[in-house]
Image (tube, helix red, strand yellow):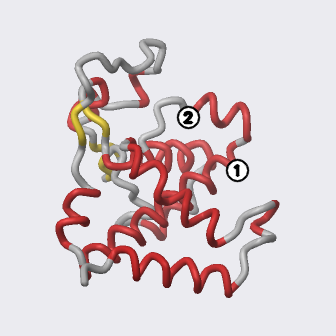
Amino acid sequence: MINEGIRWGRKFGYGTFLGNKGEKYFQEDIEKRVRKMAWSHACPVVEKVVKEYGPEWTEKRYAECNLFFGLITDEAAGCNFPLYFNLLQPVDRLPEETADPNINKKNVPLTFWRQMSPLSTPWGYALPRVLIEQFGRGENNKDRTAERITKGLQILEDEVRID
């Protein structure tokens, strides 16, 4: 099942937030939750991120990026289907592009070595982070305000829409 990119009912790098069994998610230990979010986020170096930032921060960051990627794709699904389709397509790696051979193979599906999943593409990686910056972050999201969120949602709606 790992080879197909599906684990815990989640496709590798497609941004699943809680999934179909979300109510059980928070009953699990933090390590399993982080691994699930990392899988959905397409992070091949979850151990390194946890070591540097801690499991709580790591889980929240992956969850936030996954949630906002879903927000972006949902907006595109409603008003710009070609964009929606493109955002959710894996992209073949360039022939000369190689991923770090030291990556723990248990953290990635076999497809990782030849394809970038949606959240691994430059736009899949960047777009959720653009929204995070617009909405505001800072320690405990202290810079996040209703005004910034409203403006970010309006920008998202305006930019995704096909006129």
Q: Measured from the top left, where is residue 67 in percent x and y? A: 48, 65
Read off the residue under disc 2. 46
Query: For this view, does 78 lie left or right of residue 35?
Result: left
Three-letter code, disc 2? Val
Question: Where the C terminus falls, by quadrant?
Answer: bottom left
Number of the label disc, if any, that sits on residue 57: 1
Task: Tell me which corner region of the image, top left, top right, bottom left or bottom right, holds residue 91.
Answer: top left
Name the residue at 34% across, 77% down.
75
Secondary element type, mark 2: helix
Label 2 or label 1, whichever comes before in sequence order = 2
Please say if 79 is above or below 131: below
Residue in the image at 22% along x and 50% along y: 89
- Decide: is 136 above or below 29: below
Given residues 62 and 4, the one toward you in this image is: 62
Q: Are marks 2 and 1 in contact (CB under 8 Å)?
A: no
Give me the disc on residue 140.
none
Distance, label 2 to label 1, CA atoms, is 12 Å
Mark 1: amino acid: Trp
Relative image position of residue 134 (x, y in whole percent): 62, 69
**Mark 2 neighbour density, 10 Å: few (under 14) some (14–19) many (20 or more):** many
Q: Residue at x 39, y 21 (%)?
A: 99
In screen coordinates, is 55 left or right of 34? right
Q: Secondary structure at mark 1?
A: helix
Q: Quadrant of residue 81?
A: bottom left
Query: Seen from this angle, which residue lies furthest front?
Result: 163
Residue at left offset 42%, top offset 13%: 101
The correct choice, above or below, for 7 with respect to 3 in the image is below
Quarter of the figure that contains the N terminus = top left
